[in-house]
Every structure is written in C-alpha cells, then in structure tokens.
Amino acid sequence: MSHELAAERQQEIIKMLKKEGKVIVSDLAKKYNVTFATIRRDLDILCKKDQLLRVHGGALFPDFSTSFEPKYSEKSILNSDLKKRIGVVAASLVKDGDTIYLDSGTTAFQVAENLREKNKLIIITPDLKIGCFLAASINHEVILIGGKVRTNQFNCVGTIAQEIASNLNADLFFLAMDGFDLVRGVTVTDLQEAAIKKIMIESSKEVVAITDHTKIGRISMVSVCPLSKLDVLITDDSIGRDMTREIEEMKIQVLLA
C-alpha cells in the first residue's frame, strides 16, 4: 500500500512540476504530511528516471532543448555547493594587480565572492549583480560593460556592450557557459551573449572555463568557441576520470573543485 501511495505522490509531483516548473521539498512535505526524507527519496527516484532535475532544496522540470535557459533565480539554487567550490579554485588563479574579465551568471558570481581578499584588481564584467557586488569593495576597480540588459538574467549584451569590450584587454577571462562538449565546444543559449563572450576570449591572455559537471556533454544553441581556445577548465570532481583524461589530451589543464 505504501508503495502505491509513493507512486501516486510521485505522479502528482510530476504534474506540479509541469505546471509550475519547480517544487520545494519543505512545501511538498507539508502538502503530503510526510517527512523531508520521504520527499527527497521521491525526488531522487524521479531524477533517476530523468523526469526531473534535482537541485538543492527541491527540483526543476527538465527541459533539455538547446534554447532553454532557467531564470537567474532558478540558476542560483542549481548545484550551488559545486559553484561555491569552483569559485574558490578560480579565485586562487588570480594574482594581486591582475586585470580580469569576469563573465556573467551564478558560477561567475561565486568567483566574485572569492575576490574580496585580493588587492588592486581591475575587474571587467557584463553582469550587473557582480558589478554592484564588487563595487562595494575598496580593493578593486570595477568596469561594467553596459548595454541591453537580458530579462531575468541581469547581464548586458548588444552592440554597446560589444564596443566597450572590444576596447579592453585582460590577463584572465573566467568564461561561463550553458554547454561544454568535446566536439561542439563551448555553447550558450543566446546569440548576443555568445557575441560578447567571443570578444572577451580574444581580448584575454588566458581563458579559464568555469562550469559544474552537469553542463559537460551538453550542447546549447549557439557556439561560442572550440575547446582549443581554452587554457584551463575548472569543474567539480563528478566529471569522471575518462572525461578528464580526454580534456587534458586536448592540452587543457583541468582543475577539480
């Protein structure tokens, strides 16, 4: 009987996901009058069936189309612990006095979080949240690449942003992405975002890709660059030994967070 109840509850959870896009463990536990552990077990079962995407505190409805991009608020809870670890490793590559391009997004924000102890950096970013966060630090000079602001993403794109970026140069570029594939390279969902990333790649001495393992092997709609443009990949240790070896054979240094 309990098995039947669990199956029925799981089907209802899928219906909720299709309607609302996300579910929260605490809300489901209250709704069904069960423990958090029971709901987590339900979500884990559904995740193994590829019926949802597990995130900290809940789940998202999976949409694996090449043009799908979650809202910033949804991204912020996706693999947040992994992103924090990646941010720590990325910041360790930055030396006092460096000029860096810092990409947009929630993984890049974790890099910004770990730059506060550095000194005399010049940080160039198209991300409004990162720009405002770092502008509160007296240690750094922040250059915000302005332009058209993407709805629900808080980063600047378009011709104004591209013109500003094309006149600047950096020691390091921390490159965020939606997909990382051995054949198709780095990809994103938005054409204008891809355009500004390409400029920042060409304007930097060293390109450091930052992404958690869930984007490895994924291909999004717009190509940014082949993997040959990358010097370093920072990801988490769930990437697997075989994939790590294949990437390293492409002369890319892999750092595991």
Image (tube, rainbow, N blue to C red):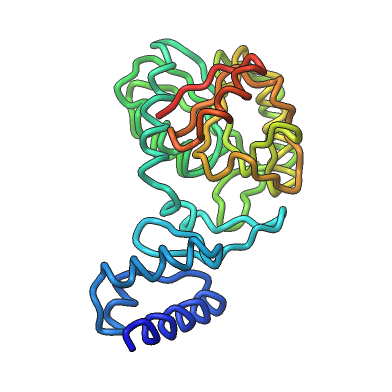
On screen, residue 179 versus residue 81, left or right, reads right
Q: Which residue is found at the position 56% from the left and 62% from the top?
A: 50
Front residue of this view, candidates 69 and 153: 69
Front residue of this view, candidates 47 and 187: 47
Q: Which residue is found at the position 49% from the left and 27% from the top?
A: 234
Q: Quadrant of the C terminus?
A: top left
Count of numbered labels shown in the rendering = 0
Front residue of this view, candidates 52 and 195: 52
Q: Quadrant of the N terminus?
A: bottom left
Q: Is residue 2 above or below residue 81?
A: below
Q: Which residue is found at the position 44% from the left and 59% from the top?
A: 54
In the rendered image, the residue lying farthest to the bottom is 1
**Res 183 quadrant in image:** top right
The image position of residue 47, as x and y in percent, is 48, 62
On screen, residue 253 versus residue 190, left or right, reads left
The image position of residue 151, as x and y in percent, is 60, 57
**Res 162 quadrant in image:** top right
Q: Is residue 6 above or below residue 21?
A: below
**Res 41 quadrant in image:** bottom left
Q: Which residue is found at the position 34% from the left and 18% from the top?
A: 118
The image position of residue 226, as x and y in percent, is 74, 27
The image position of residue 117, as x and y in percent, is 29, 22
Q: Is residue 101 above or below residue 187?
A: above
Q: Is residue 171 above or below residue 112?
A: above
